[in-house]
């Protein structure tokens, strides 16, 4: 019999389950904490509950020791993550966000995330209502961008797919809205809506929401820019005459592990089957509610969809979804992927409009001596009539630029240093945020990426492979936000200045890399990479990618079934 963790004895449930249950549909006592001027932080359960409203409490880790020595409270401030299904934001909305970031955040930056949205770090508690009210005025919100719900829904952002993109984007919005928490807590707390005395109801998510975070994508093959295999639920568009007629559905991807804990493993999403387009929402609901009821609520490290599938078996999970949706999956339709990265630069779309994809190192939008990214994008948004599309590679696309506006936008982009020649290695690199804001960081990621890229560029130049792509990614801890476990060379932080080095993922993101060296220093990493890249340059087959080479040469074993192969 399938274990229903919702009905598990209360004493076995995790602390988070009790917090959700006792929260009165995510309200807790957040309102009281907003009035409390003694601390800049949130207290008790509210620390966790504000995440459902799209915020994380953080403190600047660079200042932690100093403030501790001075007997001061840590420098508490919130990070807010906006909900932006499909990553589309209008230039008018961007103007307002930019202005808030400049005036009311400690860092003055905007951070594009690898899930097609932006984060504002360093918002003091006293400014939180202002940002939510501003978001509301411009038609945005931050509901359900964190904690145990369906997160920001991704969709392929490639500008060449104008027609399909529109449909795909509509689906990402539909699915995001459909799976949103229904509680009025957000509106009451942040938008000052009057409390309506009717009983709250969460028909899909349930009173205790999901056992763990849940991630969804809508994908137009052959582009795998969203890295779909890392997600819990994926809809791969199958088209006829340039229209989406249905979706291949894949479930159960996820990348986080715990160092040394063999009960955790990364997994690629697996195929359930093909569905007609009209069945999309009922299938989404059935997958989410099955995970809601069958997911493990007694151990958060075993709670994501991939573990539920492993616990009950894929076939049983599939049958339950079919039963709940009253839909039978048909055989998977043919599909394939060719790319994962964004095509940086100018592109003309089928409507004869232009789009400009700008590479943003780490997604950090700020001005510095080499590049006036923030000012440049701000200036562009004052004259751009179309949208911006945030990509899952932490870049930005200025889309739907008319012929008449192209020159003006290009001039601004060039004068602010937004169009630059970068190596393919750099353009395809990624790092998570890590220090100073991430409380879970074990080693640097964003702040050290450029150093590593520069050093690897030098190695690649020395061995004549400087024009090649290697997917290189860093995560500051094994939660793996930088998607290092879908890279050809991936680093995962162990402690300050030390990382595990993984190699052997592939270019399109369908193979998990394997550990090559454990707990090594930055200097040691570069020594190993020099050796590996040198060998690749000499012994590779024609056009053989780095990741494929290290597998063919048996430098590491291919991870085929991660449950067994990843650790052994
Ligand atoms: Fe993440 C937690 C940043 C994508 C797996 N992630 C965090 C937190 C919120 C730390 C925390 O819990 O206090 C980080 C905030 C740092 C900061 O200061 O901003 C954080 N994650 C990020 C972002 C900003 C990384 C980036 O540089 O772009 C990404 C935000 C995405 C978004 O807009 O929603 C981000 N996180 C990911 C991904 C990649 C993805 O989704 O494609 C993963 C791996 C995929 C997966 O889910 O398996 C990921 N983040 C985690 C985990 C591990 C979850 C798990 O299954 O165990 C945590 C920790 C947790 O949830 O307990 C985490
Ligand atoms: Fe923080 Fe770890 Fe995620 Fe990096 S991988 S943002 S260090 S939780």
Image (cartoon, helix red, strand yellow):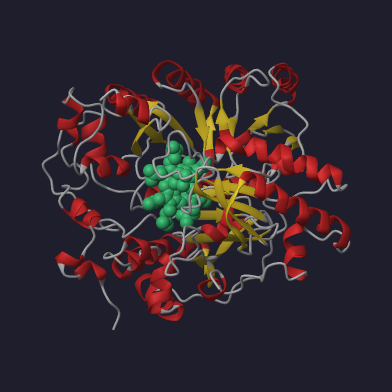
Q: Residue at x 27, y 48 (%)?
A: 182
112 vs 465, left or right, is: left
Quarter of the image where the C terminus is located = bottom right
22 vs 130, left or right, is: left
Q: Residue at x 61, y 70 (%)?
A: 559
Quarter of the image where the N terminus is located = bottom left
Q: Nearer the viewer, residue 284 or 77?
A: 77
Q: Is residue 238 visible?
A: yes
Q: Residue at x 66, y 21 (%)?
A: 371
Give the farthest residue toward the left: 197
Q: Nearer the viewer, residue 439 or 425?
A: 439
Q: Nearer the viewer, residue 76 or 498?
A: 498
Q: Position of residue 374 (x, y in %)?
A: 58, 21
Q: Position of residue 326 (x, y in %)?
A: 38, 73
Q: Nearer the viewer, residue 79 or 182?
A: 79
Instruction: Establish if 94 lies above or below 17.
Output: above
Q: Position of residue 291 (x, y in %)?
A: 35, 66
Q: Is residue 172 visible?
A: no
9 vs 182, left or right, is: left
């Amino acid at each position: 019999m399938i274990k229903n963790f919702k009905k598990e004895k209360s004493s076995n449930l995790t602390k988070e389950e009790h917090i959700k249950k006792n929260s009165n549909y995510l309200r807790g006592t957040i309102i009281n904490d907003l009035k409390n001027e003694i601390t800049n932080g949130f207290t008790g359960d509210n620390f966790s509950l504000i995440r459902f409203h799209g915020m994380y409490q953080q403190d600047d880790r660079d200042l932690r020791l100093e403030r501790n020595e001075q007997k001061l409270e840590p420098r508490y401030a919130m990070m807010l993550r906006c909900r932006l299904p499909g990553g589309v934001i209008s230039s008018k909305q961007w103007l307002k966000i930019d202005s808030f970031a400049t005036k009311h955040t400690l860092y003055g930056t905007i951070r594009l995330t690898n899930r097609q949205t932006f984060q504002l770090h360093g918002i003091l508690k006293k400014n939180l209502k202002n940002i939510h009210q501003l978001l509301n005025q411009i038609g945005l919100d931050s509901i359900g961008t964190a904690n145990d719900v369906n997160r920001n829904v991704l969709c392929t952002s490639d500008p060449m797919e104008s027609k399909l993109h529109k449909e795909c984007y509509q689906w990402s919005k539909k699915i995001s809205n459909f799976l949103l928490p229904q509680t009025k807590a957000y509106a009451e707390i942040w938008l000052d809506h009057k409390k309506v005395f009717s009983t709250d109801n969460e028909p899909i998510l349930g009173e205790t929401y999901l056992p763990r975070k849940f991630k969804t994508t809508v994908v137009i093959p052959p582009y795998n820019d969203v890295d779909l295999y890392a997600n819990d639920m994926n809809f791969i568009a199958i088209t006829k005459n340039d229209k989406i007629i249905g979706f291949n559905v894949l479930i159960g991807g996820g990348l986080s592990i715990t160092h040394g804990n063999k009960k955790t493993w990364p997994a690629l999403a697996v195929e359930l089957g093909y569905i007609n387009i009209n069945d999309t929402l009922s299938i989404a609901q059935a997958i989410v509610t099955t995970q809601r009821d069958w997911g493990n609520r007694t151990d958060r490290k075993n709670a994501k969809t991939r573990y539920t599938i492993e616990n009950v078996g894929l076939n049983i999970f599939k049958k339950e979804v079919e039963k709940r949706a009253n839909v039978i999956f048909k055989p998977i339709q043919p599909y394939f992927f060719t790319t994962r990265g964004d095509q940086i630069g100018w592109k003309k779309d089928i409507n004869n409009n232009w789009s400009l994809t700008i590479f943003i190192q780490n997604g950090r939008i700020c001005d510095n001596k080499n590049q006036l990214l923030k000012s440049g994008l701000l200036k562009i948004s004052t004259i751009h009539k179309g949208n911006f599309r945030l990509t899952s590679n932490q870049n930005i696309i200025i889309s739907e630029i008319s012929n008449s506006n192209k020159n003006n936008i290009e001039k601004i982009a060039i004068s602010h240093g937004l169009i630059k020649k970068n190596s393919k290695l750099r353009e395809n690199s990624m790092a998570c945020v890590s220090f100073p804001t991430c409380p879970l960081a074990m080693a640097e990621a964003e702040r050290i990426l450029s150093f590593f890229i520069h050093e690897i560029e030098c190695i690649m130049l020395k061995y004549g492979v400087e024009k090649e792509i290697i997917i290189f990614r860093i995560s500051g801890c094994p939660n793996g936000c930088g998607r290092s476990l879908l890279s050809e060379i991936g680093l995962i932080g162990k402690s300050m200045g030390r990382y595990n080095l993984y190699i052997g993922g592939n270019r399109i993101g369908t193979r998990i890399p394997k550990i090559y060296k454990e707990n090594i220093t930055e200097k040691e990493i570069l020594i190993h990479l020099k050796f590996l890249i040198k060998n690749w340059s000499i012994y590779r087959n024609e056009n053989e990618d780095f990741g494929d080479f290290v597998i063919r040469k048996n430098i590491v074993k291919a991870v085929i079934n991660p449950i067994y192969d990843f650790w052994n």
